[in-house]
Amino acid sequence: MKQQANQIRAGQVIEHEGRRWTVLKQQIITPGKGGAFIQVEMRDLRTGNKTNERWRTADTVERLMTDEKEVTYSYADGDNIVLMEPETFEQMVVPLALLGDAAPFLQDNMHLTIDLVEGEPVAVHLPQTVVLEVTEADPVVKGQTASSSYKPARLSNGVKTMVPPFVEAGERIVVRTEDASYVERAKA
């Protein structure tokens, strides 16, 4: 299905130069002189290579229609992950690279959404937030105001994030999987 370049959104799958790409980020740029254009960061579904492409907003691109399927994460197997359909218990093997930067947030029995193009997996979506334990947190520096200061912390999955000064090591917090940012303390 053809669509204008300015309608491209993250998560979509497009066909460009005979290959399939998943869109990671998009940004519309309006320079002081000349027409606006869209800059798109995308990943090749076959090789996993990333590239940036620019289109004028009036250009058209071929968008591939995707089917969504709910699955459950079973286990990791080298560079792949094994997912299971809850109704049929059918398993499918998907490259870990489809998760991108969100891979460290994968947890046992996590419910995921997978996008398929002609039966082939092209993207895996994690829940928006996960609960993780803080394993390391810097001490609070006296004199810092609580309103704008955050301190570095390491989570149980090894990811570094910034947390408010009141969060200590050993606490469980809710973290956004998209950018590893702190949301709130986890409910008991």
Image (cartoon, helix red, strand yellow):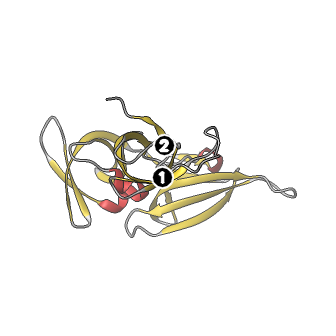
What residue would you read off at disc 1? Answer: 161
Q: Nearer the viewer, residue 149 or 93?
A: 149
Q: Which quadrant of the figure has residue 101? A: bottom left
Q: Nearer the viewer, residue 128 or 166?
A: 166
Q: Nearer the viewer, residue 171 or 29?
A: 171
Instruction: Tally the marks.
Output: 2
Up-down: is 38 above or below 145?
Answer: below
In what element is the residue under mark 1?
strand
Q: CA distance from mark 2 to mark 1?
A: 7 Å
Residue lying at the far right in this picture: please name it.
Answer: 33
Q: Does label 2 or label 1 sit earlier along the sequence?
A: 1
Up-down: is 173 above or below 123?
Answer: above
In what element is the residue under mark 2?
strand
| Residue 69 location (% of width, % of height) | 29, 40
Q: Does the rendering let one see residue 122?
A: no
- On the picture, is 81 further left or further right than 63? left
Q: Residues within 10 Å of mark 2 (few under 14, many from 20)?
A: some
What residue would you read off at disc 2? Answer: 182
As shown in the figure, which amino acid type bears the numbered disc 1?
A: Thr
| Residue 173 location (% of width, % of height) | 39, 40
Residue lying at the far front in this picture: please name it.
Answer: 142
Is the C-beta separation of discs 2 and 1 under 8 Å?
yes
- On the picture, is 34 further left or further right than 126? right
| Residue 186 location (% of width, % of height) | 37, 34
Q: Residue at x 42, y 35 (%)?
A: 185
Q: Which mark is residue 103?
A: none
